[in-house]
Image (tube, grey):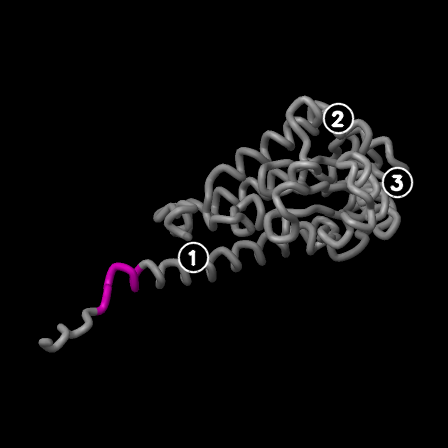
Amino acid sequence: PGALPPLVPMERKARRLYQHRRFCVHAVHLLRQLGAAWKSLGGAGPHPAARAKSLLPGKRAGLDPLKVQMSTLVLVGLNHTTARVDLRQKASFGATQLPEGLKRLSALPGVRESMIVSTCNRVEVLSCVEHQGTGIEAVEAFLSDTSRVPLEQLQDKLYRYADEQAVRHVFRVASSLDSMILGEPQILGQIKSCFTAASEARTVGAYLTHLLPAAFRAAKRVRSETSIGEYPVSVSSAA
């Protein structure tokens, strides 16, 4: 047989790879900037009372700014990387189930604010609680009760974040950096819908009404200032 032709570099794919790396670096930089901004709002520890009142709209939200400042943000959930589809379906909340779920969640002792993110690939509870340990335990028990999955079977499938790690995770999810397909655009709209449901159920207050809009702005910047949405990837092409 004749000699094989020489290999020719695929310049277009190499350019895409470079753009993908540049996007990752830029996205991480944006997340770090937003994380630093969150710290200035109290994420790194308690602020003086006067500054807390100026930073947190407690009066407008009907909450005491000092109580919000002393709260802990926790996130408990499962997604496509930790749980099979049958378990995710059991744990999910439909549009008609979400208001009742939010009502039950907000009635738990020590839970001051809460919202539920429920999509086909993830179920997450984001709450502002009085104490981190008891707050996480309460949310785990809530998910076990609503999914009717024994707690000991569910716990191994759950991930848990608190404070800055929870904020970073919310930013990553909203920016589709934590999606099954990197850059898929649907997740931002889904989170906005879940936030709207929580707002209508009156389970969010000063803390989450600061956090979620910041995450939405971060997601928009990631899409507009990086190439994450320039080359959409489908499940079939990624297989």
Residue at numbered disc 1: 23
Of the numbered discs in the image, which one, if any, rests on residue 110?
Answer: 3
> Measuring 80% from the left and 28% from the top, which residue is drawn there?
62
For marks 2 and 3, the one nearer the N-term is 3
Q: Residues within 10 Å of mark 2 (few under 14, many from 20)?
A: some
Residue flagged by tag 3: what amino acid is it?
Answer: Gly
48 or 173, which lies in front? 173
Of the numbered discs in the image, which one, if any, rests on residue 127?
Answer: none
* Tag count: 3
State whether residue 62 is above or below residue 213: above
205 or 50, which lies in front? 205
Tag 1, which secondary structure? helix
Tag 3, which secondary structure? loop
- What percent of the width, then of the height, locates residue 65? 81, 39
Bounds of the magenta segment: 9-15
- What percent of the width, then of the height, locates residue 146? 78, 34
